[in-house]
Image (cartoon, rainbow, N blue to C red):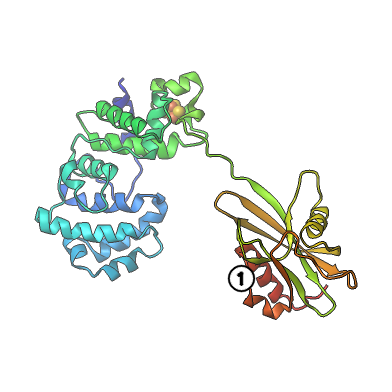
């Protein structure tokens, strides 16, 4: 049997019962509203999350006229928790466009559907094929994955040229009969069987058509350029107390990362160095001080744009009588009572350390 036949045979027995799916193969164009609504809600969102929202939304706005007439604030309130709120705003706007430009009937053609706010090529194809039985492909991430495996496509998947190739392939493969069911079958296959990791090839209804499976490369498709691994640094900081119950803070050099902000002095661990040795070295290099490094006070994680850090903050005692710190690798330094830390600008990671510090009853070393 051809690929489409095998897929549709499987769909007829395995189709998932979803509230927005039509009974049998009957086409009911008036339900285009339901298909459209479900497709918008399903963008970036799991099926199970969408179900209750879909039910509540249809109860509040059973027709597109009801939606168009509703205040936007009410629509957004109903959408609360579903995320990506531009979807709700676009949906509301598109409902008015349907009333104004299409006499209240959601259009059938992809080109007209694309004129509606928030409707992209995938959604237009899904509504046209599922609600109206038009022979239009609907290509989302799931379907692209399935096709890239079935045809063992090795082009990098995010490139515009590759995307164009997939749309061309999808158009060619669409059967004349039941294009909407075919599209839904592909979506189901991607969601249930041909999963991103560990595809269930042993249960796959189109296994015999699958080139990637035959070649044993299914888990390497689609081909994606690997994102560079974000560097992750271990960083130390000292909560250095003097006998007056003050903490030593240092101001970072004006140029560079977090330039001019204040911090608990310390720095990045070097290869082969223990965290406490790292802290002692940094304090000597930046402030020319020696301290007693005590217990680990807290650990804070923070992500910058191009790297991440884990900050290990240690409680330390200053060697009284060993002279004042010197601003060698920092712009300035100061002894500050914990209650006055608020007056200085700190980065987010140090702010977390301060929050932890101020929440403690017993702060002294
Ligand atoms: Fe996906 Fe495996 Fe089926 Fe190929 S055989 S389409 S890789 S589940």
Image coordinates for residue 100, horizontal then vertical, percent: 11, 58
Q: Residue at x 28, y 28 (%)?
A: 168
Front residue of this view, candidates 70 and 307: 307
Image coordinates for residue 234, horizontal then vertical, percent: 71, 51
| Quadrant of the picture in which ligand 1 is shown | top left
Q: Residue at x 67, y 71 (%)?
A: 354
Q: Quadrant of the C terminus?
A: bottom right
Image coordinates for residue 36, horizontal then vertical, percent: 25, 50
Instruction: Inspect this view and state whether residue 9 appears.
Output: no
Q: Residue at x 85, y 64 (%)?
A: 291
Q: Residue at x 81, y 50 (%)?
A: 274
Front residue of this view, candidates 116 and 232: 232
Please name the residue that numbered disc 1 is placed on.
Answer: 345
Binning the other alpha carbons within 10 Å of mark 1 as few (below 14), some (14 to 19) or many (20 upward) gives some
The reply to whether the residue tagged 1 has its Cβ within 8 angstroms of ligand 1 is no
Image coordinates for residue 343, horizontal then vertical, percent: 63, 77
Instruction: Establish if 73 lies above or below 221.
Output: below
Which corner quadrant of the image does residue 324 belong to? bottom right
**Residue farthest left in this picture:** 103
Front residue of this view, candidates 29 and 118: 118
């Amino acid at each position: 049997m051809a690929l489409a036949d095998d897929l549709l045979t499987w769909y007829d027995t395995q189709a998932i019962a979803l509230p927005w799916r039509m009974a049998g193969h009957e086409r009911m164009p008036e339900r285009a509203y339901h298909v459209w609504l479900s497709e918008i809600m399903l963008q970036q969102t799991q099926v199970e999350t969408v179900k209750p929202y879909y039910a509540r939304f249809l109860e509040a706005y059973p027709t597109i006229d009801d939606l168009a007439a509703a205040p936007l604030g009410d629509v957004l309130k109903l959408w609360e928790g579903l995320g990506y709120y531009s979807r709700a705003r676009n949906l509301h706007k598109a409902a008015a466009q349907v009333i104004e430009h299409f006499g209240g009937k959601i259009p059938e053609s992809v080109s007209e559907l694309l004129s509606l706010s928030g409707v992209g090529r995938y959604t237009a194809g899904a509504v046209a094929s599922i609600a109206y039985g038009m022979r239009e492909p609907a290509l989302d991430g799931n379907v692209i994955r399935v096709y890239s495996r079935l045809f063992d496509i090795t082009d990098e998947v995010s490139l515009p040229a590759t995307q164009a190739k997939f749309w061309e392939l999808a158009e060619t493969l669409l059967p004349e009969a039941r294009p909407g069911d075919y599209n839904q079958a592909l979506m189901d296959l991607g969601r249930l069987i041909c999963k991103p990791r560990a595809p269930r090839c042993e249960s796959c209804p189109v296994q015999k058509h699958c080139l990637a499976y035959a070649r044993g490369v299914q888990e390497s498709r689609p081909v994606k350029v690997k994102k560079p691994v974000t560097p992750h640094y271990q960083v130390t900081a000292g909560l250095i107390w003097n006998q007056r119950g003050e903490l030593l803070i240092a101001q970072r050099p004006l140029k560079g990362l977090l330039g001019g902000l204040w911090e608990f002095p310390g720095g990045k661990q070097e290869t082969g160095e223990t965290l406490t040795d790292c802290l002692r070295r940094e304090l000597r290099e930046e402030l020319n001080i020696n301290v007693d490094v005590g217990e680990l006070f807290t650990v804070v994680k923070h992500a910058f744009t191009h790297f991440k850090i884990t900050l290990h903050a240690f409680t330390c005692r200053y060697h009284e009588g060993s002279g004042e710190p010197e601003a060698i690798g920092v712009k300035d330094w100061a002894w500050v009572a914990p209650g006055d830390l608020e007056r200085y600008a700190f980065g987010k990671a140090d702010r977390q350390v301060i929050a932890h510090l101020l929440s403690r009853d017993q702060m002294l070393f």
